[in-house]
Image: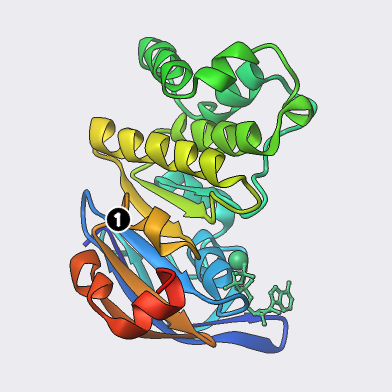
Amino acid sequence: MLLELSHVAAAYGPVQVIEDVSLTVPEGGAVGILGANGAGKTTTLRAISGTVRVPRGSIQFEGRDIRGKRPEEVAALGIAHVPEGRGTLGNLTVQENLRVGAYLRKDRAGIESDIAFIRELFPHLARRYASNGSALSGGEQQMLAIGRAFMARPKLLVLDEPSLGLAPSTARDVYAAISRLRTETGISMLVVEQNANLAFSVVESAVVLETGRSVLSGATAELRGNDEIRRAYLGG
Ligand SMILES: Nc1ncnc2c1ncn2[C@@H]1O[C@H](COP(=O)(O)OP(=O)(O)OP(=O)(O)O)[C@@H](O)[C@H]1O
Ligand SMILES: [Mg+2]
């Protein structure tokens, strides 16, 4: 397994909001996390990234225990996290944001070809290449945040609700690009999403969180056939 969470609990100070979350991401796989508002999806990603306290459970990345590691250590091991609400650097240009994403890399030719790939993947961004991050639309900022995370060439790309706040057609564009990113580079992904139709366009399996617990997981085909999942996450 690339990533394995086993009975993870997570807390903000004394307040434990994740009780018992288990999930796995296979090498080369893409996995979704579904769940209602407040279920603990973002906190689960923060537990992986090392930005929240994890009092119980184990988190293994490539067979190595990463629980309790600092965020920059986790990033250096190959996990790139695109947080909820994007997190681009507003006072840097699109180009500078992409280069910041690659700051740990030494392979200049690889960096240039990856930038060319991102520009081709997100034509909107290519047109705004010299603009500041803060001048971009919400959809463009999401694209830039994904592009910047990819520029680190992580082994695992972690995306927190990439469709949040976007018009439906923009959300579909973003997901089409995520899907291409995945099929053309084979990068592994862990994707939090409330819109299961979008998530299922990219992931092969998903886990459902309810009030801080993983309550169900399965292949997307199996989850599509589940009445409860259909009602709650697939719009009937
Ligand atoms: N910084 C924080 N301090 C204290 N409690 C928090 C903090 N952030 C989140 N929580 C609480 O933790 C619980 C889980 O929140 P989390 O953000 O992980 O949910 P989520 O599934 O990502 O929800 P959403 O779909 O709204 O993004 C919620 O009850 C929330 O109020
Ligand atoms: Mg969230």
Q: Residue at x 75, y 21 (%)?
A: 132
Q: Secondary structure at mark 1?
A: loop
Residue 90 point in image, percent of width and height: 77, 31
| Between 192 and 74, the one nearer to me in the picture | 192
Q: How was the colour assigned to the protein in this rendering? A: rainbow
Q: Quadrant of the N terminus?
A: bottom left
Indicate whether 97 appears above or below 130: below
| Between 85 and 123, the one nearer to me in the picture | 123
Which residue is identified by label 1? Answer: 203
Crowding near the residue tagged with mark 1, few <14, some 14–19, many ≥20 C-alpha atoms within 10 Å: many
Do we see residue 218 in this rendering?
Answer: no
Residue extending farthest to the front is 236
Q: Residue at x 62, y 63 (%)?
A: 51
Residue 80 point in image, percent of width and height: 48, 46
Query: Where's ligand 1: which quadrant?
Result: bottom right
Q: Is residue 4 left or right of residue 68?
A: left
Residue 94 point in image, percent of width and height: 64, 21
